[in-house]
């Protein structure tokens, strides 16, 4: 087993509360039951486990299915012109929003630039000391009332990778889970995300081109359609374990009612990789 990708920010507790346990808590909170977790590969910055074991300790009374999708097929199903555009420009995630700076607008206009620069510098130093990848802070406005906020954006990266063992190209892009537009669209089906407390307000995400350009609604909707076409709903029961290759298999979670208890362990790889790689190279 390997450390959780979120280990550096201690964002995911272990199932039994032991900080040394390799089994981490999945998204089981009652406050997140109507939050459809979009399809994604697990990675934070440069930390991406090779494999995962998802286990069911208790299934939800209704819904809560574990979702999987083949990233190789998603790559093949997307419009070639969109894939080319995304690959040429790269992609970039917004990984955090700090929506606490409405008070800046109440300052005298002459004082705002200096205050905003100081606030941005302090926040950037604090965040970058906590994560193991570089974060760039940008001023923006968010929420229903368009409050001034700082948005933390990760470095740009390609949306398609070549599998390190098989050499196959596959979709490695978390737009389905990270796009604020797609999450907003799902609210009309499942209800509001209920991002009410401080931590939840901070943990809002979005996705852009690598040059910080916006991705069109039409392209986002196409990626959503292709992704959902490839999703399989797996209704796990107590004791079930789903093993997956985190590079070529995306995962997510359906909304649920009742009590749900699932966990996950991450792995750096598996036995026989070198033999698999040799066979792939021969073919």
Image (cartoon, rainbow, N blue to C red):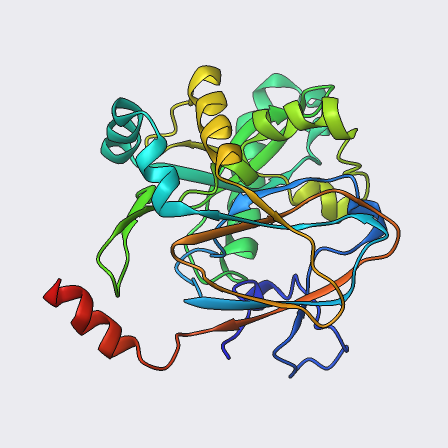
For the image shown, how many numbered marks are present on the structure?
0
Whether residue 138 is visible to the viewer of this picture, yes or no, is no
> Is residue 161 positioned above or below 116 on the image?
below
Image location (x, y in percent) of residue 263 = 68, 67
Q: From the viewer's perspective, is 254 left or right of 251?
A: right
Image location (x, y in percent) of residue 130 = 55, 62
Residue at (70% x, 73% y) in the render: 14
Residue at (42% x, 23% y) in the render: 215
Whether residue 255 is visible to the viewer of this picture, yes or no, is yes
Image location (x, y in percent) of residue 184 = 66, 25
Residue at (24% x, 29% y) in the render: 84
In the picture, residue 189 is in which quadrant? top right
> Is residue 254 positioned above or below 217 on the image?
below
Q: From the viewer's perspective, is 85 left or right of 3?
A: left
* Quarter of the figure with the C terminus: bottom left
Image location (x, y in percent) of residue 169 = 26, 48
Q: From the viewer's perspective, is 24 left or right of 3?
A: right
């Amino acid at each position: 087993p390997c450390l959780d990708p979120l280990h550096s920010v201690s964002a995911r507790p272990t199932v039994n509360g032991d900080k040394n346990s390799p089994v981490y808590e999945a998204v089981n909170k009652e406050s997140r039951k109507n939050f459809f977790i979009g399809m994604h590969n697990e990675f934070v910055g440069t930390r991406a486990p090779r494999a995962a074991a998802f286990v069911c300790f208790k299934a939800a009374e209704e819904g809560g299915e574990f979702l999987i999708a083949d990233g190789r097929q998603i790559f093949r199903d997307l419009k070639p012109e969109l894939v080319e555009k995304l690959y040429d420009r790269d992609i970039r995630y917004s990984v955090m929003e700090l929506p606490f700076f409405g008070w800046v607008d109440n300052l005298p206009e002459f004082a705002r630039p200096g205050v905003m620069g100081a606030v941005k510098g302090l926040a950037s130093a604090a965040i970058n000391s906590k994560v193991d990848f570089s974060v760039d802070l940008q001023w923006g406005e968010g929420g229903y009332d368009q409050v001034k906020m700082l948005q933390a954006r990760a470095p740009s990266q390609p949306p398609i990778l070549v599998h390190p063992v098989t050499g196959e190209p596959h979709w490695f892009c978390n737009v389905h889970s990270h796009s604020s537009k797609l999450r907003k669209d799902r609210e009309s089906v499942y209800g509001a995300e209920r991002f009410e407390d401080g931590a939840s307000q901070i943990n809002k995400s979005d996705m852009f081109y690598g040059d910080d350009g916006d991705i069109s609604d039409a392209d986002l909707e196409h990626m959503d359609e292709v992704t959902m076409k490839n999703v399989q709903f797996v209704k796990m029961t107590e004791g079930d374990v789903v093993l997956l290759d985190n590079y070529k298999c995306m995962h997510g979670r359906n909304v649920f009612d009742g009590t749900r208890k699932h966990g996950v362990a991450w792995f750096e790889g598996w036995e026989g990789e070198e033999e698999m790689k040799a066979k792939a190279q021969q073919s």
